[in-house]
Image (cartoon, rainbow, N blue to C red):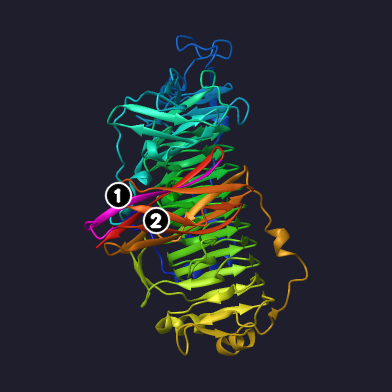
């Protein structure tokens, strides 16, 4: 769970939604009475607030049109279509000036890559809109990288190239997880791309292989080892140098459409590639936030915004992030392939997800995809209130497909597929995790082939304390008032269908408030798929035992689904051939002279080939490492033994494990603690 900070004070807000009146400053009973009165009388409110959960930007008010062309333009031009500006910053400056003069402006951007960082911070801004729009969707890129040349062959290996490195960034500080030590590789911000292919960063020349790079700040030199056959002289080698691509503070009535934001060298938890903070009425349409070192896109303390038809993929930490937001709508968005940076330090949790939505009120998520993340898929993380998730597809994630944590609800998850996740196969993860979540409604969903269990309850006893960021009210949250109706839950092999193995003292709150019926439960391999904490922890029950214990699912079935095939419904394919190199533990504690043991695994993403394994133990005095087996074909695991000597002094020593297959090199740095 991510820690929630104190929220800002807000006046009571009343919003007209169809025939409902919603006021978050009144008790829920009062709200229900008001809603009933509104429905009976047909009361119509002339509310100034926008419709719940979306932006409503009137682009028809944009009477000025400014054009940008990075190839043919000049910032000394007028900005007209025939005489465009050259840079986005010039166009944005004109748009802000126009706005202060009560002129709404559309900025039209011709195809090209713009290596700039943009800031929208109004000064006496009016309510008129500003639109930043690609002339053709998807053909405009705002890049955090510059193209570097002047590479020369390294004398120690003619497959490695070097050039001077002018920066002394060091490691980032991650305030969100300061109490959880991270490997230095996780806190780096350097990125290099050769002909559009991301190179894996390593921290020594010893670790270099095809597809890697190394920055030696001591001698101010950077080294790259591109794929075999690369002509370095003619290759496009891009080095990420700008930490943020678009930042907006206290903005309103802004549209960003059809633009790619990539290669931001942002620190995790500090600088998302794109951020809107304390802003309102923002529309993101058909944008992408891909291949950034930290987070892709973040809404912070903002209201009435929409993100639609957009992707936040392949980011080093997390794709989508929001914090203390209200009236948000995410429509047909994607957050996939994220947390590659964290995975280099065996960090698969803590601020990393495909999509992480913290302190979210009155918001909707429709048609979102979260696939192949080396962490959780989607996470409603603390203080989720009046949230609906509809038609989510979350699959093939290393941890949970969908998690609701420390939230007072109501939260509705409906018509969604949560499949083939928890590839980590860790206890208390699975398809849907409820971690201290009350008032959750699961309707019409498919939970299929998730390791450990399809539905998991976890948390702490007695409950979790949660503060509503708007009202300041504190709730003690338990896993109770859960509704499950017309869901399909299918496990394979030894997977559980339901698991709550240890919250014994709070079981009565869950069981007495559970409403579950018309579901299809199935696992052909066993008849004991329900784990409960009574009469003792990890009691395993059959379906009939589950029904007898809970008094629920009278009209549910324990049989293979007949209407749809979950395997077909949940089938997804990766966007490129790749593999994950993962490990069972980030740390091993041993005595001098003993061996530390880890288990590493290769998980293929459309990949088939042989992966050779090695280790850099140069920072462990007289240390050694062996693998059994020494290579993995397509997928599988290997046991790693890291040896120490009787003379090894007490301390914490980093060891980097390396997996190589052609130009795809992956690394994991772990700690061996000698006590």
| Residues tagged 1 and 2 counted as in contact (Cβ below 8 A) | no
In this rendering, position of residue 668 left or right of residue 227: left
Q: How many marks?
A: 2
In this rendering, position of residue 609 left or right of residue 436: right
Secondary element under disc 1, as helix, strand or loop, is helix
Image height check: is 203 above or below 462? above
Image height check: is 410 above or below 321? below
Residue 175: which numbered mark, if any? 1
The residue labelled by disc 2 is: 350
Image height check: is 167 above or below 276? above
Residue 546: image x %, image y %?
Answer: 59, 85
Q: Residues within 10 Å of mark 2 (few under 14, many from 20)?
A: some
- Report, in whole angstroms, how far the alpha carbon at label 1 lies from the one at label 2: 11 Å
Residue 608: image x %, image y %?
Answer: 64, 48
Q: Main secondary structure of the magenta part?
A: strand
Residue 374 in view here: no
> 543 or 523: nearer the eye?
523
The C terminus lies in quadrant: bottom left
Which residue occupies 52% across, 38% down? Answer: 290
The N terminus lies in quadrant: bottom left
**Residue 650 painted magenta:** yes
Residue 476 in view here: yes
Which residue occupies 44% across, 64% down? Answer: 405
In this rendering, position of residue 95 left or right of residue 647: right
In this rendering, position of residue 301 left or right of residue 307: left
Secondary element under disc 2, as helix, strand or loop, is loop
Q: Mark 1 or 2 closer to N-term?
A: 1
Q: Give the range drawn in magenta.
A: 645-661
Residue 141: image x %, image y %?
Answer: 53, 28
Q: How crowded is mark 1: few (under 14 residues within 10 Å), some or many (20 or more)?
A: few
Which residue occupies 42% across, 75% down? Answer: 478
């Amino acid at each position: 769970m991510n820690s929630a900070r104190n929220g800002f004070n807000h006046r009571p807000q009343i919003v007209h939604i169809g025939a409902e009146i919603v006021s978050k400053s009144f008790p829920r009973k009062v709200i229900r009475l008001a809603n009933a009165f509104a429905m009976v009388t047909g009361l119509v409110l002339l509310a100034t607030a926008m419709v719940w959960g979306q932006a409503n930007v009137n682009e028809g008010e944009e009477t000025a049109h400014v054009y940008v062309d990075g190839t043919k333009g000049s910032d000394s031009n007028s900005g007209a279509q025939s005489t465009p500006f050259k840079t986005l910053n010039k166009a944005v400056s004109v748009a802000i000036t126009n706005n202060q003069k009560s002129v709404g402006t559309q900025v039209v951007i011709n195809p090209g890559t713009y290596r700039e960082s943009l800031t929208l911070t109004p000064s006496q801004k009016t309510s008129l809109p500003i639109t930043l729009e690609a002339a053709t969707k998807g053909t405009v890129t705002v890049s955090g990288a510059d193209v570097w040349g002047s590479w020369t062959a390294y004398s120690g290996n003619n497959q490695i190239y070097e050039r001077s490195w002018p920066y002394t960034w060091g490691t980032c500080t991650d305030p969100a997880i300061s109490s959880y030590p991270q490997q230095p590789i996780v806190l780096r911000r350097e990125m290099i791309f050769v002909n559009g292919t991301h190179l894996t960063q390593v921290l020594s020349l010893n670790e270099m292989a095809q597809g890697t790079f190394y920055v030696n700040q001591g001698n101010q030199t950077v080294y790259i080892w591109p794929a075999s056959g690369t002509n370095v002289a003619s290759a496009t080698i891009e080095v990420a140098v700008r930490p943020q691509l678009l930042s907006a503070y206290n903005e309103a009535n802004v549209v960003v459409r059809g633009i790619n934001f990539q290669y931001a060298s942002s620190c995790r938890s500090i600088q998302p590639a794109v951020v809107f903070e304390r802003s309102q009425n923002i529309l993101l349409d058909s944008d992408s936030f891909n291949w950034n070192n930290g987070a892709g896109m973040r809404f912070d303390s903002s209201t009435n915004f929409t993100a639609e038809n957009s992707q936040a993929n392949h980011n080093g930490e997390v794709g989508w992030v929001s914090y203390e937001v209200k009236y948000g709508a995410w429509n047909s968005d994607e957050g996939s392939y994220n947390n590659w940076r964290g995975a280099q330090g065996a960090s698969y949790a803590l601020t990393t997800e495909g999509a992480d939505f913290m302190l979210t009120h009155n918001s909707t998520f429709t048609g979102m995809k979260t696939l192949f993340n080396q962490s959780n898929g989607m996470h409603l993380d603390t203080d989720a209130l009046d949230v609906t998730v509809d038609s989510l597809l979350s699959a093939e994630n290393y941890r949970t497909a969908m998690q609701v944590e420390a939230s007072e609800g109501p939260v509705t998850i409906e018509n969604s597929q949560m499949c083939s996740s928890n590839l980590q196969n860790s206890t208390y993860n699975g398809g849907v995790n409820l971690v201290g979540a009350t008032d959750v409604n699961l309707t019409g969903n498919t939970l299929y082939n998730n390791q450990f269990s399809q539905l998991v309850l976890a948390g702490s006893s007695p409950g979790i304390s949660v503060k509503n960021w708007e009202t300041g009210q504190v709730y003690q949250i338990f896993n109770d008032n859960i509704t499950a109706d017309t869901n399909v839950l299918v496990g394979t092999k030894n997977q559980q269908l339901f698991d709550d193995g240890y919250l014994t003292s709070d079981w009565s709150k869950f069981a007495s408030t559970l409403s579950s019926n018309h579901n299809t439960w199935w696992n052909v391999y066993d008849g004991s798929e329900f784990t409960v904490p009574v009469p003792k922890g990890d009691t395993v029950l059959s379906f009939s035992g589950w029904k007898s214990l809970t008094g629920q699912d009278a009209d549910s079935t324990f049989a293979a689904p007949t209407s749809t095939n979950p395997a077909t419904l949940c089938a997804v394919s990766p966007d490129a051939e790749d593999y994950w190199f993962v490990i069972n533990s980030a740390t091993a504690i041993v005595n001098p002279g003993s061996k530390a043991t880890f288990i590493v695994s290769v998980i293929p993403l459309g990949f088939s080939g042989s992966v050779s394994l090695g280790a850099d133990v140069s920072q462990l005095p007289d240390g050694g490492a062996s693998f059994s087996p020494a290579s993995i074909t397509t997928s599988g695991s290997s046991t790693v033994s890291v040896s120490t000597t009787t003379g090894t002094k007490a301390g914490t020593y980093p060891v980097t494990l390396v997996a190589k297959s052609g130009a795809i090199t992956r690394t994991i740095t772990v700690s061996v603690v000698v006590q």
